[in-house]
Structure formats: C-alpha cells, structure tokens
Amino acid sequence: MRPVEIGLDGLLCLLLLVLAWKALRAPHLYQSAIYFIALGLVMALAWVRLAAPDVALAEAAIGTGLLGVLLIDSLRVFARDSKTDPDAESEEPPPGEINVYPAGSARPSGRTLPMILVTASCGLLAILLVEAIIELPDGGGLTAAAQENLERSGVDHPVTAVLLNYRGYDTWLEVGVLLLAMLGIFCAGGRVGFAETRQSNPPGHLLSWLIRALAPLMILAAAYLLWLGKLAPGGAFQSGVILGSAGILLRLAGFQVISRLPPLAVKLGLLLGFGVFLIFGGAALLTGRAFLEYPEARAGELILLVETAAAVSIGFTIFAFFAYLNSRDQPEAQENHAREEGGNQKP
Amino acid sequence: MIAGIETHQIYAVTAGLLFCMSLGGLFLCGHFFKKIIATKILGTAVFLLFISLGKRNAMEFADPVPQAMVITGIVVAVSAGAFALALARRIWRETGQSTFEDKP
C-alpha cells in the first residue's frame, strides 16, 4: 500500500473519530444532529474506500439522509414544546440551547464516579478490542462461494445476488422489520392511519417549481437504480429510498401526496414488498422447491419483480415514517387529524 | 513498518475505537436524542468492522455477503432509530421528560 493511500485512510478514520466524539459531546442537540449527519457522509466515503459502493449508497441515502431528516424534525418538536409547555420550560433551556444535562448547566457532582468508571472500562475494552482486531487471522469468507454460483443466480452483481437470491430470507424479513417499525411508530403516536396536513407557511414559487421539476427525475432515477442493481451497485433499497425522499420533498413543499391516493392503495403499497415475497415463497414451496428458491431459468425476471415490489414498499414506508412523525406534532394538526380520521380513515 | 499496513486494518481498528467511544456515550449522555445517536454510531462501528474484515480476502470483488448483510442492517438500524425517536417524542409529549433521570 502506498503512503498516500495510508494517509488518506488515516485522515478519513481520524475524521470519523473526531466527528463521532463531537456528535456525542456537543453541548446542543442541534449540533449533535449536524455532526451525526457529517459522520454519516464521511462514513459513506469510508465504505467506498473499503470497496463497498452498495453500502456507501445505502449509508448516504438511508443511514444519513433519512435519519438526518427524522432527527432534525424531532428536534423541532423538542425545541417547540419546551417553549409552549410551561411545565417543561423550567427544566429545559430555550430552543437551540438544549443542554445535554437538562437538570442544570453544570454536571451533577454525584455523577463523577460513574463517569470515571464508564470511561475506564470503555478504555480497557478499546485496548482489548484493538488487540483482538490486530491479531485476527486471515482467511475464511464467502467470496469464492458467491463467485462460483453467480452465473446461476440470475443477476451479474454479487451483492444483489446475495441480497435477493442466496439470502432472500434476510431481505424479506427486513422489509417485515420496516413494516413493523412503521406500525410501532403509529402506535407510539397514538393514532391509526396517517393524514396529511397543509404546511402552515406555503413555499415560495421557486421551491415549488424546483420540486415539481425534480420529482419526476427522482422517480426516473429510482427506476434506473433498480434496473442497475442487476449488474452494478444499486438495487431495491437505494431505489426505494429515492422514491421515499421524492415523497418527503413533495410533502415539504406542501403538496399532498398520500391523501391524494385512496387509503386502500396506500395500505397495498406498504404491504406490497412483504406480500410479494411471501406469495412468491409460498408458490416456491407448492411447486416443490425450497422457500424463496428461484427456478434457475427465470431467476432474473423474478428477482426484478420482487425487487420492484420491495422498492415500492420501502419508498412508501420511508415516506410514512416521515409523514406520520411530521404531521403528528404540527400544532394546528390536531383538529385536522380528528376531522380526517372521522371522514375517511377507519379507526 | 508503515508499508505493511492494509486498508482494512486501519478501518478495523477505527471501528473498535468508535465502538468503545459510542458505548461510553450511550451510558454517559442523558438526553434520549443523544442516546439514540450513540446507538446509531455503535451500530455503524459494528458494520465498519464487518465490512473491513470482509475486505481481507478480496478476490475479483470484496466479499459480498457482509456487504449485503450490512445493507440490510443499515435499513433495520434506521427503522429502529425512527421507532426510538417516535417513542422519545411520545414520552416528551406526555411527561415533558427527556432523560431517564428522576425529576429533582
């Protein structure tokens, strides 16, 4: 390895550590969120250096993009409520100055001992871990096995082959986890179904025009990435996230996305990925193959079908995460919810 | 000495350090919001270690199995993070509390 490369990797790693430290130690939550987003982007560069462009795409889009939006949206709630809620005002500083230690500006003195203990044990763990990592033996791994069966998998990109063919179970259950998380968010919000509310301040003409122009391009890009997953980095997750973020952008610009669709279509969209996997796996069982096993001749087409369904579902779910959390805490939203829930949503 | 260092070793060691740092952060940070961020960094450190170990024996391409599992993991971690945020927001709305500590 050339010294330039070592320098680059060392710099990236240093940046990762510094950003993580800053994200954990920043005095204000807002700074924390921004450092965390920066950490995610540097992490995406690290994935590229480790020859994992698929992971880089997923990290940048889902791990950083989507979660960043959700974090900042939550911050709006934490900050706003501390202004309006008289109870909370006494213990929370005003927005933008939310301290890590809400009870007072100084760290309580009783916490010094636990802090030393935690720091010492984490330091010890770090030494042991680094020692263990350096002494790990080489060898093993499944590269050879993946390469050997690539021709029979129906796709040309090894990561897509693993995701949808060799380890279809993982992907199926992952779509299930997304669905479960969405149901959990609905439960935590205390309401069934999600309705959209108009933004309190309408966006300017420029923003509205820009997003109108961008949305079709984003849908096109999502379809392209989905198709590309067959032979290069890309695939259902990345494509689904682009679909979802197109929805989020449209919503931020004040367009109604979900409420334009009939509720049944929304539910179908959310369930599509999980359902297609399940139907397909069941059909495979009925025809005497293993669950989620593809017939070799048609594997390519079937994988594309399953991937499309998964991408649509992921897009819908990701949008639902945001739309639900965002609309739940709009101050003027409560009455609208009540009206729309009574009108067209079944409780 | 320096020429013997491989890319994956640098990142694997960084992953170990990140893990311990965020583990400490998880214990020491009070606010839910920071605990969620610490958990996310913790997960990312594990992913980083996994991928860098997958690069040890790269042939024509790096080991695709850890990559696929990490992509799955990232999506699951984000779902869990979103759920945790929803819970934290509910707790905040109901009780006005943003930490696990008792009110003084």
Image: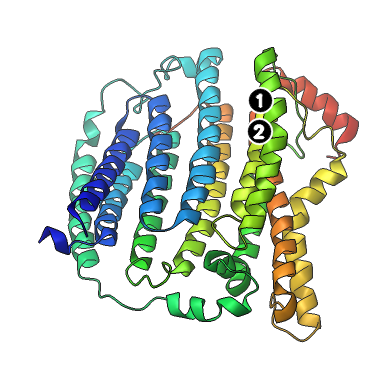
Mark 1 — on which chain does it sit?
A
A74 and B102: which one is in front? Answer: A74
Give the side of residue A13 with respect to residue A120, left or right. right
Q: Residue furthest left?
A: B1
Residue A268 lies, in percent from the top left, at 82, 50
The image quarter containing residue A34 is top left
Q: Which residue is at a point 75% across and 49% down the rendered structure image? A: A270
Q: Which residue is at a point 70% across and 80% down the rendered structure image? A: A296
A173 and A77: which one is in front? Answer: A173
Q: Which residue is mark 2?
A: A248
Determine whether A29 is above or below A331 in the image.
below
Residue A292 lies, in percent from the top left, at 69, 74
Secondary structure, mark 2, is helix
Distance from the alpha carbon under mark 1 to that under mark 2: 6 Å
| Both labels 1 and 2 in a single chain | yes
Residue A58 lies, in percent from the top left, at 52, 50
Residue density around tag 2, few if under 14, some if 14–19, many if 20 or more, within 10 Å: many
Secondary structure, mark 1, is helix
The image quarter containing residue A129 is bottom left
Q: Which residue is at a point 75% across and 62% down the rendered structure image? A: A305
Residue A149 lies, in percent from the top left, at 55, 80
A303 and A98: which one is in front? Answer: A303
Give the side of residue A47 with respect to residue A266, left or right. left
Q: Residue furthest bottom?
A: A288
Q: Are marks 1 and 2 in contact (CB under 8 Å)?
A: yes
The image quarter containing residue B33 is top left
State the mark number for residue B23.
none
The count of marks equals 2
Q: Which residue is mark 1?
A: A252
Screen quadrant of the C terminus of chain B: top left
Identified by mark 2, the residue type is: Ile
